[in-house]
Every structure is written in structure tokens, then in C-alpha cells.
Image: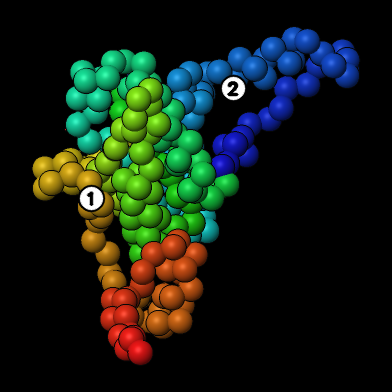
């Protein structure tokens, strides 16, 4: 996971002390200011800064940036049925699952409540769809272990991509991805709803490349072949 510090300078001690306690405290404070206390993911404030930075990078490099909103389904009932502490445990479980299933350079944040947001640098919509679908499936397949049993969770995901020909602001990009999450909620939950793109480019990706991509994300790339029948002797 990216530490998102590429545009931050490390403060140095004005009198050159090697283990300066003030600088150590400054660094800790800076970490706290951008971290969500419960999940230890980045907080919304850091998310906005990081997103702007990645959008600028897209403009310079022409590499797209994808944005994924992940919102747990019916989370209120988790709190209502099991209590706030179990709800907190579930949020921490999801944070860890995100970290475990993303690249180091992806930027996972807690947007607020039971809503998470992930910036996927250098990721087009096609690849983003694999990532989002994998996250959705992993959440569904990874129950939270609680006292006396397990707790099954699902999430709805909205996904969209910012390209170098886009002229929108960070707020507009956020609103676009968030609207897709809303659509996922409205149309049944536990699903990924993504933006539209010119998928003509995808026609240029051959099946081998699609298979490699699918394998990297542990996703089926094509309809599985029917299993061969075995004849019992
Ligand atoms: N345990 C815990 N619960 C939280 C926290 N932040 C928000 N919540 C709860 O998350 C729940 C969100 O409920 P809703 O906004 O109704 O969403 P939902 O029940 O997930 O329904 P949908 O999103 O429509 O599927 C509320 O009960 C909040 O109290 C937190 O830090 N800890």
C-alpha cells in the first residue's frame, strides 16, 4: 500500500540532532492527521489530497486513475443485532481485507462510517473492474469471526476512471464514482457498478493477455468449460 508521502518532505531537526524527539513527534502527528483511528487506513482528508495528486499524475503521464467506492451492505443491522463493538470489528476486518488484496501503490481510505474508498493509480476501467470484482468476492467469502459464530458481509461497489482527456475536478470525479455506488445499492447491492468507457480498446487485448490479467486477479476470464465426464469402470 502506498504511504502517500511522495509529495511530503520529511522534516529535519534544525540543530541537526540525529534522534530529535520533536521531529519524531511531528512525524507521529502528521501520521495521525491522515489516518483513521479505528481502521488505520488513510482518512478522508488524506484521500482528497492523494486523489488530486493522482489526477495530476494522470494528466502528466496519460496513465488513468481508477476510483472505487466500497460500502458495506445493511451495516446498520450488524450494529443493531450484534452491537457497536462487533460493528467495529467488522470494519477493521474489511480494512485488513482491502490491504491484503490491493497493490502496495493503491491507496485505501476510510471515507466515513461503513464506506471505504480506494484510489487505483495507473489503472484503467477494464483492470479496475477485475480489482473491484475480486474485492467484492473476497468480502463475500471472508466472514468475520465473532464470539459464538461468524458474520457474513457483502459490499456494493461503484467504480470509475479518470483519464488524461477528462476535464473534471476531483469533487466531480468523486461524485461520479459515488453515484455508481448509489446505483449498485439501488439495483440490488453486493455488486459492482462501473462507468462506461470505449471498450474498443479492449478488442485489441488478445485472449492470452486477458487470461494473464484474469489469473493475476484470480478471476475467471471466460466461461469455464464443462467438466469432462468420467466413466466409472
Ligand atoms: N460499529 C460502527 N458502526 C458505524 C461506524 N460508523 C458508522 N456506523 C454505522 O453504520 C451504519 C450505516 O447505516 P446505513 O447508512 O443505514 O447503511 P446500511 O445499513 O449499511 O444500508 P445500505 O448502505 O443501504 O446497505 C449506521 O448504523 C452507523 O451507526 C463505526 O465507526 N462503527
Q: Is residue 166 visible?
A: no
Report which quarter residue 16 is drawn in.
top right
Q: Which residue is mark 1?
A: 191
Question: Which one is nearer the viewer's eye here, 167 or 195?
Answer: 195
The residue that appears at 35% across and 21% down in the rendered structure is 86
**Vertical placement of residue 7 versus 87, above or below:** below
Q: How far from the left and from the top, in percent, is residue 102?
A: 49, 48
Q: How far from the left and from the top, in percent, is residue 232?
A: 33, 86
Query: In front: mark 1 or mark 2?
Result: 1
Report which quarter residue 200 is drawn in.
bottom left
Disc 2 crowd, CA 10 A, few/some/many (<14, 14-19, 20+): some
Q: How far from the left and from the top, in percent, is residue 69?
A: 32, 41
Work out which quarter of the rendered image holds the N terminus and state it. Answer: top right
The residue that appears at 32% across and 88% down in the rendered structure is 231
Say whether mark 1 is within 8 Å of ligand 1. no
Q: Is residue 49 left or right of residue 204?
A: right
So how many labels did they put on this image? Answer: 2
The residue that appears at 19% across and 31% down in the rendered structure is 74
Amino acid at each position: 500500500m502506498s504511504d502517500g508521502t511522495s509529495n511530503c518532505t520529511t522534516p529535519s531537526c534544525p540543530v541537526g540532532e540525529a534522534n530529535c524527539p520533536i521531529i519524531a513527534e511531528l512525524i507521529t502527528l502528521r501520521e495521525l492527521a491522515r489516518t483513521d483511528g479505528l481502521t488505520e487506513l488513510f482518512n478522508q482528508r488524506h484521500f482528497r489530497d492523494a486523489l488530486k495528486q493522482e489526477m495530476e499524475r494522470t494528466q502528466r503521464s496519460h496513465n488513468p486513475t481508477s476510483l472505487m467506492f466500497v460500502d458495506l451492505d445493511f451495516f446498520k443491522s450488524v450494529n443493531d443485532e450484534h452491537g457497536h463493538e462487533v460493528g467495529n470489528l467488522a470494519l477493521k476486518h474489511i480494512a485488513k481485507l482491502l490491504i491484503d488484496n490491493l497493490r502496495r501503490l493503491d491507496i485505501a481510505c476510510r471515507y466515513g462510517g461503513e464506506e471505504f474508498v480506494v484510489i487505483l493509480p495507473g489503472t484503467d476501467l477494464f483492470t479496475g473492474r477485475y480489482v473491484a470484482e475480486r474485492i467484492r468476492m473476497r468480502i463475500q467469502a471472508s466472514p468475520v469471526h465473532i464470539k459464538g459464530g461468524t458474520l457474513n458481509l457483502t459490499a456494493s461497489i461503484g467504480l470509475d476512471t479518470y483519464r488524461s482527456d477528462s476535464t473534471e475536478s476531483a469533487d466531480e470525479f468523486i461524485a461520479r464514482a459515488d453515484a455508481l455506488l448509489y446505483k449498485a445499492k439501488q439495483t440490488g447491492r453486493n455488486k459492482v457498478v462501473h462507468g462506461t468507457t470505449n471498450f474498443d480498446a479492449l478488442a485489441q487485448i488478445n485472449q492470452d493477455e486477458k487470461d494473464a490479467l484474469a489469473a493475476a486477479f484470480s478471476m475467471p476470464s471466460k466461461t469455464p468449460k464443462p467438466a469432462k465426464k468420467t466413466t466409472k469402470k
